[in-house]
Amino acid sequence: MNETKRAIVNDRYEIGRRVGRGGMAEIFQARDILLDRTVAIKVLFAEFAVDPAFVERFRREAQSAAGLNHPNIVGVYDWGRVNNTYYIAMEFVDGRTLADIIRQSNTFTPVQVCDVISEVALALDSAHQNGVIHRDVKPGNILISTTGQVKVADFGIARALGAGIEQNLTQTGAVMGTATYFSPEQAQGAPTDQRSDIYSLGIVMYEMLAGTVPFTGENAVAIAYKQVHENPMPLDQRNKSIPAGLTAIVAKCMAKSPDDRYATAGEVRDDLRRFVDGLPVVAMTNRVVATPSDSVTQVLPITQNDPNATTVIAKQDQPTSQIAATAPRKQATMTRTRAANYPPYDDFAPRRTAGFVFGSFFAAIVL
């Protein structure tokens, strides 16, 4: 593109190529002229900018997301207005989404799954400790860099949009997210806490191990109904080679009742670490059976046909609220040898099996 024709946003961001497009925004690679660094610019579609109340919530949530400082969370740098809509400037991750890698690789080994999900759990645990629920955990929001670094994106936008819907539909209640990865409480429009993210994380694990998501349907409403009323096919029936311990961890994450799930994302990571280390996992000693809800769930028709698109389902119930910030968890001490080219920012990552280098594996796929 000719330099004289290259778009400049707010005299600071030089917009380059488009690198992604989702249900509510386009993402561009850009250069921060002021700081001379590469960034990603997420530009909301104009229809999300027509409500002043939403814009204010979006501003607050962008600021909240900017306060999340963790190596496994995509950093948010700035927000502003461009033309008739708004943008977020954030960290640029040179790599691909987990969704892209799943489409290419289909399934993963148990150790690969533990490596990725452990890093995602670290990100979620940090956000939850700061009072932020993601509410849209899915492979499309999990980024893998060319060096194998795992990062979770879209904390601010997911929360802002969900809050906006709830404010506008206080008479009916509302829930926002991706139906394929909905928790049962999201599908019912019930209040959510950090355990809703844990359910969604369980679905991501299920998909990585089985090569398919647990629930499919003709539309988002049908899938959301199944999240509440049906049990998934057990992983060991999908693939008999999946170890029982990992199957139990996924099942505990995906328990229908939040009380039967892990209480925190940190607990998920701890159990994954036990599994990789060959130790008994909590999920095996305290197994639960996912029991479909007997309550009547109202799932109203929507026009969105893509079950993987960000979706709204209305129901009479209470709106979702943020969790209160909690005290940081005390990390257990662990001594291990790190693979030479694995990102050095986490001293508690699970031990790799002999001869397996996680960073090299994902770098090859991403590249």
Image (cartoon, rainbow, N blue to C red):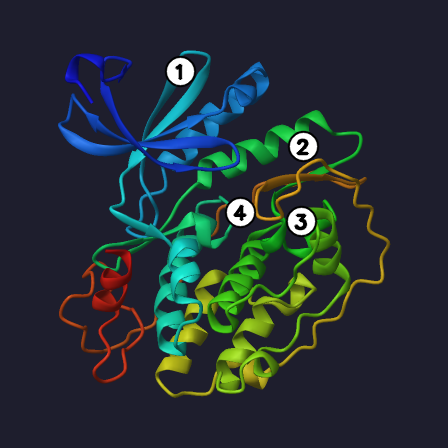
> What's the mark number on residue 186?
3
- Three-letter amino acid code of the residue under disc 2: Glu
Q: CA distance from mark 1 to mark 2?
A: 24 Å
- Residue at mark 4: 136
Which image quarter is the N terminus in?
top left
**First reached walking from the N terminus: tag 2 or tag 4:** 4
Residue 362 appears in the picture as rendered:
yes
- Three-letter amino acid code of the residue under disc 1: Arg
- Residue at mark 2: 166
Q: CA distance from mark 3 to mark 2?
A: 12 Å
Which image quarter is the C terminus in?
bottom left
Residue at horizontal 54%, vertical 65%? 202
Q: Which of pointers 1 and 2 indicates the residue nearer the eye?
A: 1
**First reached walking from the N terminus: tag 1 or tag 4:** 1
Residue at horizontal 53%, vertical 81%? 239
* x and y percentages locating residue 287 in the rendered image: 62, 81
Q: Nearer the viewer, residue 62 or 187?
A: 187
Q: CA distance from mark 1 to mark 3?
A: 31 Å
Q: Are marks 3 and 2 in contact (CB under 8 Å)?
A: no
Q: Are marks 1 and 2 in contact (CB under 8 Å)?
A: no
- Residue 289 against residue 35 in the figure, above or below: below
Q: Which of pointers 2 and 4 indicates the residue nearer the eye?
A: 4
Give the crowd class for mark 2: few <14, some 14-19, many >=20 residues within 10 Å: many
- Residue at mark 1: 81
Q: Which quarter of the figure has residue 144?
A: bottom left
Name the residue at the front extreme.
1
Q: CA distance from mark 3 to mark 4?
A: 10 Å
